[in-house]
Amino acid sequence: YLQGYARITAGERNEGIADLRAFVAKYPQHELANQARRTVVERLLKDGRKDELAEEYKLLMAQEPRTAEGLYDAGFIATRLSRPKDSETAWAALRKEFPDHPLAARASLDLAQGAFGRGSFKEAATLARGAAKSDDTGIRAQAQLLLGESELKQKRSAPALQAFRAAAEAGSDHPALRHRALAGGGL
């Protein structure tokens, strides 16, 4: 792991990526395996190597045993490759296989944002409700805000106001989010 990380840092990207991939293949359950995968993905993204990113997506989806981090990263990669169906597949698997993991709430929020962008407001509201149960106040506030916006688009004022109020309370550490929630409540 350290050799691969050092090579990437020194500018020997291809060799470093190869070292990190070899480390993950040999020690898939090691505590640094997820960090190694993430470093590979970040480097491939920075270098714009889409073919290798697509291969990394396949590796993460085929990983046995699956991990919440691997599934989330697979969804993230698919998003960066403009493959929304693949990201939905990865994040749906994450939500199903690891429903109590913190990344499941993040995946629910990401899926809700995608559904909102497509105009599927009912689906966005359902997914945002799931994300709103997160222990992370930032995710919870964003999910409540998205829930309020989704309910508003469905012309459901009372649930929208309730969600906007919850977002304003949860978003006290995030001023911009809190202001959006207050503005949504005003609508």
Image (cartoon, grey):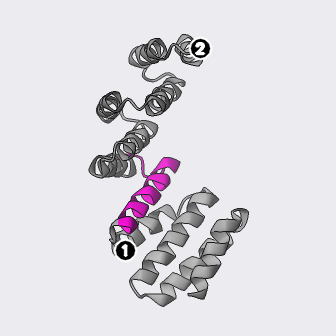
Residue 3 seen in the figure: yes
Is 12 in front, or is 160?
A: 12
**Vertical placement of residue 152 versus 39, above or below:** below
Q: Earlier in the sequence, mark 2 or mark 1?
A: 2
Badge 2, how many Cα within 10 Å: few under 14, some, many 20+? Answer: few
Location of mark 2 (residue): 10
Q: Is residue 114 within the magenta segment?
A: yes
Residue at (32% x, 71% y) in the render: 120
Q: To which quarter of the image does residue 141 belong?
A: bottom right
Q: Is residue 8 magenta?
A: no
Magenta residues, start to end:
97-117
Q: Quadrant of residue 155?
A: bottom left
* Mark 2 element type: loop
- Where disc 1 sits, the SS reads helix
**Residue at the image position 48 percent from the left and 24 percent from the top:** 33
Q: Is residue 149 left or right of residue 83?
A: right
Q: Amino acid at mark 1?
A: Phe
Q: Which residue is mark 1?
A: 121
